[in-house]
Image (cartoon, helix red, strand yellow):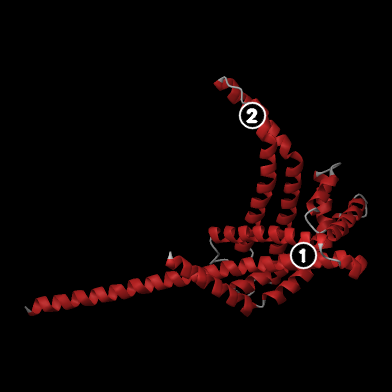
Amino acid sequence: MNIKKKDFKNFILNLLNRISRHDITTYSAALSFYLLQASIPLMMVLVTVLSYFLAGKEDIIFKFVDFLPNTTSKLIVDAINILLVSSQSPTVTTLTILFALWSATSGINKLINAINHAYGLHNNKQAIKQRLMSIIFTLVFIFLIVFLLVFQIYGSSIIGIFNSQIIEKITVHFNTNIQSALDMISSPLFKLFSYTVPFLIMALAVGLFYKYSPSNSKNRIRNREAFLGGLFVSIAISLATFIYSYFINNFSNQSLVYGALAGILALFIWLLIVSIILILGAECIAAYREGYKKDFFDKNVDKAQNGKIKRKVTDLFKRKTNEK
């Protein structure tokens, strides 16, 4: 138990040292600016893709920003409404979408640079290769949002199909009637799925990003480290967003001071918080790996030293035996 406490203490001290040494706040401020710059092209691509999957049900998109502060969500909803109208225009060509996608990858590209810095890696990838990696993860992010929104719409239907196809067969086979009990738990079950599935998918996506986006193609982080980093980021972003939204909606008077710019300022601060958490997740993984490697090295040194002592004792015993 003492060893675990000591390891945890060393991990915290190492993490604090890395935060101070790597200047996380400066990197986060730069990253939040690029994320803000990439938000409009990203929303343009996202709305265009969603218009094909959610034809006639575009209102579900607005539920995706309900967790943000009121001023920020109103700003994003207005932008989405404009993009929904423009996406129906024939002037929106494939070339326009590709250009918007390329512009949207700037935020992901800077995030990869920040993770490389946290891992202590040099950006030895070619610029075009790293940009292609940014495009891949941007597409993953877009289709992740599409999946979550589609799940919100059709999740109850999926549970209904499960009830009618599988549970009825079980009822007939075992000559029991559990439909009434199932009707009671199906609604809470869907609510549980609607919260846990997006949360776990977000943790998995962030973990994959931590694992495959950096420049170390040979010495990648382990799957457990990547998933724990993604889980930390998911929990931290959820809590930070809830606290920030509650504070802005109930205690802040930004709209009185900044007027129409309050929504943009609130969005930028939220992106800054998200950027800090994303970089902090990479720093946590790096600090854990440093401690793991140090423990592994110390154990092997101890084994080597014990082996040397054992050999010396054996040699001494042999010499004494030969003298006799």
Please, what secondary structure does the residue beneath circle 2 have?
Answer: helix
Query: Residue 294: percent from the left, percent from the top?
Result: 46, 72
Would you say residue 292 is visible in this rendering? no
Query: Residue 275: percent from the left, percent from the top?
Result: 71, 67
Task: Provide the residue designation for mark 1.
Answer: 270
Q: Which amino acid, by three-letter code, is at mark 1?
A: Trp
Which quadrant would the N terminus be assigned to in this image?
bottom left
Which quadrant would the C terminus be assigned to in this image?
bottom left
Query: Residue 133: percent from the left, percent from the top?
Result: 68, 63
Task: Provide the residue designation for mark 2.
Answer: 181
Is there a contact, CB below 8 Å, between mark 1 and mark 2? Answer: no
Circle 1 Cα neighbour tier, 10 Å, few/some/many (<14 / 14–19 / ≥20): many
Q: Quadrant of residue 99?
A: bottom right
> Is 251 placed above or below 317 here?
above
Q: Which amino acid, by three-letter code, is at mark 2?
A: Ala
In this rendered view, identify the residue nearer to me: 188 or 165.
188
- 15 vs 52, left or right, is left
> Is 169 placed above or below 97 here?
above
In this rendered view, identify the residue nearer to me: 27 or 135.
27
> Is 126 placed above or below 234 here?
below
Residue occupying image coordinates x 58% and y 25%: 170
Residue occupying image coordinates x 32% and y 75%: 305
Give the mark nearer the N terminus: 1 vs 2: 2
Q: Quadrant of residue 123?
A: bottom right
Would you say residue 177 is visible in this rendering? yes
Please, what secondary structure does the residue beneath circle 1 have?
Answer: helix
Query: Residue 120: percent from the left, percent from the top?
Result: 59, 75
Q: Which is in the foreground here, disc 1 or disc 2?
A: 2
